[in-house]
Image (cartoon, helix red, strand yellow):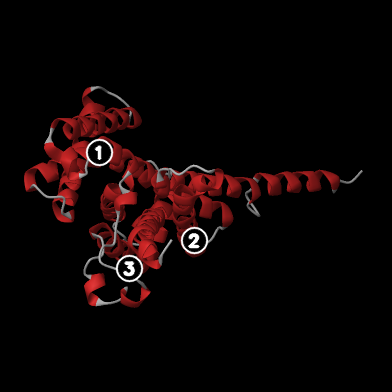
């Protein structure tokens, strides 16, 4: 592989994967701690018809109309959930399941019956993303990688995700104390005068922003996995929120890089010329990291708890 091939094909895909995993993983920490981990799953489902509608109205796959469409779909979904819950006297979980699956199915139908599939928004990309086609054209080597001409041709998905990730990191840094208090003790946060409901709503909006930014490039499967796996893995390794945030970024980075490398070059080890789905393999690596943490985490892992129980029995007086 030449430097030009790596810079044009592999590097932008790896960066998009890492940024997608990082932006979703950072927010996933608060969703996991608030026991709202499936909110990311929900948003990735209801976003699809909104994304398609945004494309059909605007006639372009530019970021802004797609995000506005997804946001509108999220608002519609919230209203439908409340209507179904009250009219059908269903619990919230059942109402959410009905709305999310129905809206995702509507999105798939719209993809198949409109011209959206011709704009690289089709059912397969909705599930698995389009990571492999994230190309950095116009760069020929390391010497010109940082020139203005080369930087001006960076993939749109990479620029969007870089901006979203920086904005998410800045938001968490700026409102860290408020997020921490409202996450661990909403009652205390309310007594201190913090707008708990506003913080929760703002968090969901930012989650939707991250999900939509990542959806086009990596698909719904990876978006769901990255909202949960990095945060859940980091939670197994520490009781400190600040360390958990850093660990989730590390896990997301390992999953993004490792998953892409295994998908692109792993099959060649057993003589297969075809590569695997990068988004799918990244989700697999994230799941394996979560499994490893569940087994071997120093305090909460299965092995460490078994050793402590055994040691406690052995230390019992005769």
Looking at the image, which residue is at 30% across and 55% down? Answer: 134
| Disc 1/disc 3 C-alpha distance (Å) | 27 Å
Q: Is residue 39 visible?
A: no
166 up-or-down from 55: above or below: below
| Residue appearing at x 25%, y 71% in the figure | 150
Q: Mark 1 or 3 closer to N-term?
A: 1
Q: Residues within 10 Å of mark 2 (few under 14, many from 20)?
A: some
Dot 2 or dot 1: first in sequence order is 1
Determine which residue is flagged by label 3. Answer: 170
Image quadrant assignment for residue 22: bottom left
* Residue 132 badge: none
Q: Secondary structure at mark 2?
A: helix
The residue that label 1 is drawn on is 46
Choose mark 2 or mark 1, whichever is in front: 2
**The N terminus - image quarter:** bottom left
Q: Which residue is located at x 20 percent, y 30 percent?
A: 106
Q: Nearer the viewer, residue 114 or 228?
A: 114
Mark 1, Cα crowd under 10 Å, few <14 / some 14-19 / many 20+, is many
Residue under the image location 33 percent in, 69 percent down: 174
SS for callout 1:
helix
The quadrant in which the C terminus is found is top right
> Which residue carries the number 2 mark?
250
Would you identify the image quadrant in which residue 116 lies? top left
Query: How far, Cα to Cα, is label 2 from label 1?
Result: 29 Å
């Amino acid at each position: 592989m030449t430097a030009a091939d790596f810079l044009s094909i592999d590097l932008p895909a790896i960066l998009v994967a890492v940024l997608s995993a990082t932006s979703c993983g950072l927010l996933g920490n608060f969703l996991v701690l608030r026991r709202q981990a499936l909110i990311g799953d929900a948003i990735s489902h209801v976003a699809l018809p909104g994304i398609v509608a945004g494309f059909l109205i605007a006639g372009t796959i530019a970021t802004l109309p797609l995000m506005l469409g997804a946001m509108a779909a999220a608002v519609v979904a919230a209203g439908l959930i409340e209507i179904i819950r009250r009219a059908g006297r269903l619990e919230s979980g059942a109402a959410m399941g009905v709305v999310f699956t129905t809206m995702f199915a509507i999105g798939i139908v719209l993809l198949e019956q409109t011209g959206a599939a011709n704009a690289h928004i089709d059912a397969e990309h909705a599930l698995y993303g389009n990571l492999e086609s994230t190309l950095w054209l116009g760069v020929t080597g390391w010497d010109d990688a940082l020139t203005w001409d080369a930087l001006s041709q960076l993939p749109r998905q990479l620029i969007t995700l870089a901006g979203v990730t920086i904005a998410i990191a800045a938001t968490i840094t700026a409102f860290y104390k408020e997020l921490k208090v409202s996450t661990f003790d909403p009652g205390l946060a309310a007594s201190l005068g913090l707008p708990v409901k506003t913080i929760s709503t703002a968090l969901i909006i930012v989650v939707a922003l991250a999900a939509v930014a990542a959806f086009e490039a990596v698909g719904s499967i990876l978006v769901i996995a990255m909202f949960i796996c990095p945060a859940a893995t980091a939670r197994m390794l520490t009781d400190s929120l600040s360390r958990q945030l850093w660990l989730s970024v590390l896990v997301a980075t390992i999953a993004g890089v490792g998953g892409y490398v295994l998908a692109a070059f792993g099959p060649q080890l057993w003589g297969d010329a075809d590569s695997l789905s990068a988004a799918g393999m990244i989700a697999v690596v994230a799941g394996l990291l979560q499994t490893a943490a569940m087994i071997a985490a120093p305090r909460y892992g299965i092995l460490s708890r078994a050793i402590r129980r055994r040691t406690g029995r052995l230390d019992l007086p005769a």
